[in-house]
Image (spheres, rainbow, N blue to C red):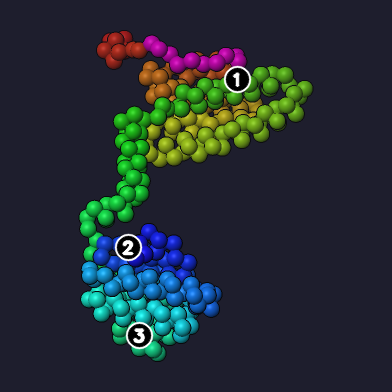
Amino acid sequence: MMSLAKARLHSVFPLERIGDTLVVTPQGDAIGFSSAQIQVELQALERMLERPASWNLIVDLEHTNYFGSEMIGHINRMGVKARSSGGRIAMCNASGDMRDILHVMKLNQMWQMFESRREALSAIASVPVGERLWAARKWMAGLATVIAVTLAIAYFPWPSRHKDYYERFMSYSNELRELRSEGRRNEGQRNGFRKKVERDLEPILRELSKQSMEGDPAAAYLYVAGRNCLLPMFNANGPAREQLERDFAENMSRAAIYIEGVDPPDVAIVADSLTKNETPKPSRTRVSRRSSSSRER
């Protein structure tokens, strides 16, 4: 007697067992196969349906839009065998044309019709818990992976890149001032540098914008410094450029509070250091509220 393992390899009527139900998926109309092959596989399936334990039968029609009368006769023959043994029979995934044909042949009165295999199995199959878990093993493994990654991110978050962005923005600002100090000699080089900075900042600003909307203050200040100050500096001159440098310094110093955990340096000092081509560094001097208030008195 043919085993289920061999029946899975059928070329015309491949078979699989799900609980107490056999699912047959015809691979095409009879005209595409030899009569001998069809009969060999059909007889093997009928012998399986004659076993003492009754099998339910689902015929999945997903592989074709149309079956001729010969193939429909073969399928109905399997259904009659399953019903005579006490099983339930159903079809699923039938096309609109196929449903019309089955209706004309009144087979829809004998077979239960379902839109999908899932619906058919839910309606007539009885699947032991062990088989359900085994069938769902890939889905469960995927879910376990997602949970593990989520927990890893929650308890072991990725290191912040804010410090890297802070230092990169300051480097861009310093290099821009150096190119400006050389005047028109390096105007072409400055234009090339501007294009490079714009390319580099595009993904960074996109990331910072998202983090800003999530309530990250360091990202918010870095975003404003990069988008509203650093990029416009390339085309600004005179008082407008000086104001952009001061705004840049102010936002960078505020971002440094959250990145380094220190009090912000004086904005005027930072702006002055930018003008002198020095890289400003966040002050590490903390001033207590008590001492500042006593001085005010």
Label 1 SS: helix
241 and 113: which is toward the camera: 113
The residue that disc 2 covers is 17
- For the residues bearing labels 1 and 3, Cβ distance under 8 angstroms: no
Kindly identify the residue that appears in the image at 73 percent across and 21 percent down. 183
Quadrant where the C terminus sits is top left
Label 2 SS: strand
Mark 2 or mark 3: name the one nearer the start of the chain.
2
Per the picture, the main secondary structure of the magenta-coloured stretch is loop
The residue that disc 1 covers is 174
Q: Which residues are magenta?
A: 276-285
Q: Amino acid at mark 3?
A: Leu
Mark 3 burial class by Cα count in 10 Å: few <14, some 14-19, many 20+:
some
The x and y percentages for residue 136 are 31, 52
155 and 161: which is toward the camera: 155
The x and y percentages for residue 263 are 38, 17
Q: Residue 186 appears in which quarter of the rendering?
A: top right
Kindly identify the residue that appears in the image at 62 percent across and 31 percent down. 197
Q: CA distance from mark 1 to mark 3?
A: 82 Å
